[in-house]
Amino acid sequence: MASSTKHKTHLHKESSSSENRPARKKDRRLSAGTANRFDLYQRSVNSPETDVDFLIEAYETIRGRKPLHLREDFCGTANLAAEFLARDSKNTVEGFDLDPEPMKWGKGRNFDRVEDRDARMTWHEKDVRSSADKAPDVTIAANFSYWGFKEREELLGYLRSAHEDLAEDGIMVMDLYGGPEALNEMEEVRDIDGAFDYIWDQKSWEPGTGRYQCSIHFRFRDGSEMTDAFTYDWRFWHLTELRDVLLEAGFSKVTCYFEGTDPDDESQGDGIFSPDPVGENCDAWLAYLVSEK
Ligand SMILES: C[S@@+](CC[C@H](N)C(=O)[O-])C[C@H]1O[C@@H](n2cnc3c(N)ncnc32)[C@H](O)[C@@H]1O
C-alpha cells in the first residue's frame, strides 16, 4: 500500500490539557536569553497525562488491577513520574537518569502538587541498566531515549536487565516513532501557546548504520533563537527490529498500540492508542510497544 499523506505529529502525543491554552503574560517576555530549556522542552514535547493514562490502562487491561510501582527510565525532569504520583497517594516511582541537571530542575519544578513526594519518589542518578530498589509493576522508557543504544548487543543488554528487574507480572512500555517521513532530513515547526516556536530538526539518517541525528531549537517572538537546545545522536530502531530484540530479551508477548486519527483534522493523531498488529503506512506515526514479562 502506498503511504498516505497523513501524519500524526512528530514526537508529540496530543493531550487535551495543552490545547488552546491562552498565551500567558510572562510568555510574551520569553527570549533565548531568559527562557529555561527544560521548561520549553516540557511544554513542547512531554505529554505526561497521555503517557500515564496509557500505562495505567494497559496494565489494568492485561493484569486486572492498577499499577502501584512505576520505574521511569531516562526520566530527565521526571514530569511523567510526577503525574503518576499525583494520580494516587499509594503510587510510588523510581526514576533513573545519568544527568543530574534535568533531575535537579524537575525535582524543584514538577513535584509541588505531589503529597509525600520524598517518601514516594526515589531518584537514581544511575545508568538505566541498574536494578530498582523494588520490582516495578511498569517500567516506561519514553521519548525514544533507548535509541541512544546504537548496537544491537547494547539494546539487548538493556532490555534483558529491564526484563529481569520487573515484577513477575510486570510490563514494559516504550514509545516509538516511524514512517517514511521520520527518516527525511527536514524540520517541523510548531507554535507553542502563541509564546514560542518549537523546531524539531531531523538533521541526518545514515541508511548503512542507522545513525540518526536530531536537534531541538526554540524560536521566540522577539526574533531570538535557542539553537541546538537539545541534541540527539541516536540509532533509528524500526518497530519490527525492536520487537525481535524484546522477544529475545525474554519478554513473553509484545503488543503494538498505534495512535488513532483526529476526526476533526485527519493530519493529526487523536492521542488514543489501540492494539493493532498491522498499523497504517502513513508518513509519520507514533506508537507504544507493551511487553509482558
Ligand atoms: C531525550 S531525554 C528524555 C527525558 C524524558 N524521558 C522526557 O521525555 O522528558 C533522554 C535522557 O536520557 C538520559 N540517558 C541517556 N542514556 C542514559 C543511560 N544509559 N542511563 C540513564 N540515563 C540515560 C539523558 O541524560 C537524558 O536526560
Image (cartoon, rainbow, N blue to C red):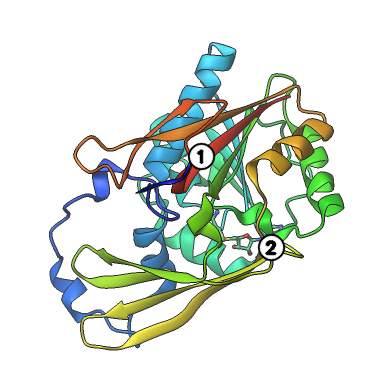
Q: Whole-percent x and y of residue 205?
A: 63, 68
Foreground: 103 or 158? 158
Asked which secondary structure carries label 1, the reply is: strand
Residue drawn at 20 percent across, 72 percent down: 27
232 with respect to 249 (left or right): left
Query: Taking 93 as reference, is 31 above or below it?
Result: below
The disc label shown at residue 98, or none: 2
240 with respect to 111 (left or right): right
The disc label shown at residue 287, or none: 1
Can the viewer see residue 218? yes
Residue drawn at 20 percent across, 81 percent down: 29
Q: Whole-percent x and y of residue 253?
A: 70, 22
Dot 2: within a 10 Å radius of its alpha carbon, few (fewer than 14), some, or many (20 or more) residues?
A: some
Report ligand 1 position as a quadrant: bottom right
Q: Is mark 1 within 8 Å of ligand 1?
A: no
The disc label shown at residue 118, or none: none
Dot 1: within a 10 Å radius of its alpha carbon, few (fewer than 14), some, or many (20 or more) residues?
A: many
Foreground: 222 or 211? 211
- Identify the image quadrant of residue 35: bottom left
